[in-house]
C-alpha cells in the first residue's frame, strides 16, 4: 500500500479574480516551501445540551469553517514576490525615477548631475541599480544597469563593478534615470489565492480557495539560510485536481543567507547584531453570517510590523535608545551566492525593550524588540525592494 511521503509533496497557486473563486483552467505557479506546512481546513463544533437518563450525547455537529495554517519557506530570488505583495497590501513598482532637462553627465567623477537638486527627493539610494536613457549628445551615457555608489541632492555617482563609464554631456536633453528594481510598500490592496496541495505518490490534490496572507515572519541569523513563514486565512477546501490546470516552471533562484548581506541602524553600518526577526501581521479575522458555514472575505485590521534585534552588548548606545525612547531606523540587505537580493527598509522604529542576557561565562547579548511606525517621507513603515 502506497502512503503519502513529504519528499513528493508540492504546492502551487493562482491569484483569484473574485474572492474564494478558483479561476477556470488556471496556469498554476509552483510555491517553494520547506517542511512544516500546516495548511488545513478547520471547523468549529458544537454538541447538544439535551439531558438524557442514559447520560449519552444526543447530537454533535460541525459548524463554521475556515482555512488556516503556516507555509514555511527559505527566502530566495524569485518565487515569493506575489505573496510578499499580498501580505504588504502593496504593489511592486519602480522605486525612484527622475525625468528632467536639468540632468547632465560628468566624466571626472563618473556621475550624473541635476541642477534642480532632485535626486534625494526622488528616492535614490546608495546600492540602487539604475537605468538611464535620453542622452543624445553622447549616447554612451545611456546605461542599462549602473550601480549607485553615492547620492547627493544634485549628484548621483555611478561605480562599482558594472563597468559603465560616463562621459561629459551638458544638460538640455530630456533624460530619465530610474531604478530597475521593484519596490513594494505597505498598502490597502486585498489579494487572495487558490492553492493546490499535491501529494504526487498517491496522486491526491487538496484545493484551498480564498487564501489570504495574514502574516509573514523572517529570521536572519549569522549563518545558514534565511527562513520564514506565511500565515494564511482562507475560505474553503475541496478535493481533486483543478480541471484544465497547468503548471508553470519553478523559480530557481538561490536562497539568501545571513552573511552575504549588510545591516544599517540609524543610517550607519552596525557589526554587532547576531540575529534579526521581522514580523508582518494584517490581523485578518473571519466573518460569519447566518445561513453559511463559510467565512465572508475576512475583516482586516492594522498593518503591524515589529521584530527584534539581538546583538553583542558592547556599550550603552543601543540600550539608551530604549531608555530615552529615541526613534531610529533599520535597513538590511539579504543576498545569496549570485549577490542579487532584497533590501528591507524600516524608516522609523522604536525599541520597546533592552535586556542583557547573561547566559554564562560567554558573550553577553542584548535583545532589543522594536515596532515599526509610519514614516511621512517614505509613506510607509516598511519598504521591500527586490533584485536591486
Image (tube, rainbow, N blue to C red):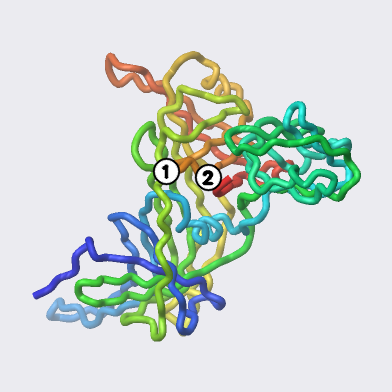
Say which residue appears at 50% left-offset and 52% top-offset: 281
Relative to residue 7, is residue 364 depicted above or below? Answer: above
Q: Return the mark for residue 256.
A: 1
Residue at position x 45%, y 68% from top? 211
CB contact under 8 Å: marks 1 and 2: yes
Q: Which residue is mark 2?
A: 342
Which label is found at residue 54?
none
Q: Is residue 58 above or below residue 89?
A: below
Residue furthest to the right in view is 172
Q: Position of residue 360 (x, y in %)?
A: 27, 17
Q: Residue at x 24, y 65 (%)?
A: 8
Q: CA distance from mark 1 to mark 2?
A: 9 Å
Indicate the quadrant containing the C terminus: top left, top right, bottom left or bottom right: top right
Q: Is residue 379 visible?
A: no
Q: Is residue 314 rendered to the left or right of residue 372?
A: left
**From what the image shows, is residue 237 above or below residue 316?**
below
Rendered location of residue 247, percent (x, y): 40, 73
Q: Is residue 121 above or below residue 14?
A: above
Q: State the residue at coordinates (51%, 32%).
A: 262
Decide which of 25, 379 is in the foreground and name it: 25
Q: Position of residue 232 (x, y in %)?
A: 43, 62
* Local SS, label 1: loop
382 or 344: which is nearer to us? 344
Image coordinates for residue 90, horizontal then vertical, percent: 61, 57
Q: Earlier in the sequence, mark 1 or mark 2?
A: 1
What is the quadrant of residue 79 in the picture? bottom left
- Element at badge 2? strand
Q: Is residue 106 visible?
A: yes
Amino acid at each position: 500500500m502506497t502512503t503519502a511521503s513529504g519528499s513528493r509533496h508540492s504546492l502551487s497557486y493562482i491569484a483569484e479574480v473574485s474572492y474564494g473563486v478558483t479561476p477556470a483552467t488556471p496556469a498554476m505557479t509552483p510555491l517553494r516551501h520547506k517542511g512544516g506546512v500546516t495548511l488545513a481546513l478547520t471547523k468549529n463544533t458544537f454538541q447538544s445540551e439535551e439531558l438524557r437518563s442514559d447520560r449519552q450525547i444526543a447530537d454533535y455537529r460541525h459548524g463554521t469553517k475556515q482555512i488556516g495554517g503556516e507555509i514555511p519557506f527559505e527566502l530566495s530570488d524569485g518565487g515569493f514576490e506575489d505573496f510578499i505583495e499580498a501580505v504588504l497590501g502593496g504593489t511592486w513598482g519602480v522605486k525612484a525615477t527622475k525625468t528632467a532637462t536639468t540632468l547632465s553627465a560628468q566624466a571626472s567623477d563618473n556621475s550624473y548631475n541635476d541642477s534642480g537638486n532632485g535626486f534625494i527627493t526622488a528616492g535614490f539610494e546608495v546600492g540602487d541599480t539604475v537605468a538611464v536613457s535620453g542622452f543624445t549628445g553622447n549616447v554612451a551615457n545611456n546605461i542599462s544597469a549602473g550601480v549607485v555608489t553615492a547620492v547627493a541632492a544634485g549628484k548621483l555617482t555611478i561605480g562599482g563593478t558594472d563597468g559603465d563609464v560616463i562621459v561629459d554631456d551638458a544638460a538640455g536633453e530630456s533624460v530619465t534615470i530610474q531604478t530597475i528594481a521593484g519596490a513594494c510598500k505597505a498598502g490597502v490592496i486585498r489579494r487572495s489565492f487558490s492553492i493546490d496541495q499535491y501529494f504526487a505518490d498517491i496522486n491526491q490534490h487538496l484545493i484551498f480557495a480564498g487564501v489570504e496572507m495574514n502574516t509573514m515572519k523572517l529570521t536572519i541569523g549569522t549563518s545558514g539560510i534565511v527562513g520564514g513563514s506565511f500565515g494564511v486565512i482562507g475560505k474553503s477546501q475541496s478535493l481533486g485536481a483543478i480541471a484544465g490546470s497547468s503548471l508553470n516552471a519553478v523559480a530557481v533562484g538561490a536562497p539568501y543567507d545571513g552573511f552575504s548581506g549588510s545591516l544599517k541602524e540609524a543610517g550607519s553600518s552596525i557589526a554587532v547584531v547576531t540575529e534579526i526577526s521581522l514580523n508582518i501581521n494584517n490581523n485578518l479575522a473571519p466573518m460569519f453570517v447566518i445561513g453559511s458555514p463559510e467565512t465572508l472575505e475576512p475583516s482586516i485590521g492594522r498593518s503591524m510590523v515589529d521584530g527584534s534585534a539581538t546583538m553583542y552588548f558592547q556599550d550603552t548606545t543601543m540600550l539608551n535608545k530604549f531608555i530615552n525612547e529615541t526613534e531610529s531606523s533599520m535597513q538590511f540587505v539579504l543576498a545569496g551566492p549570485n549577490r542579487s537580493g532584497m533590501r528591507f527598509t524600516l524608516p522609523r522604529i522604536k525599541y520597546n525593550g533592552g535586556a542583557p542576557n547573561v547566559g554564562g561565562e560567554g558573550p553577553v547579548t542584548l535583545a532589543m524588540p522594536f515596532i515599526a511606525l509610519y514614516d511621512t517621507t517614505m509613506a510607509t513603515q516598511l519598504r521591500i525592494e527586490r533584485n536591486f
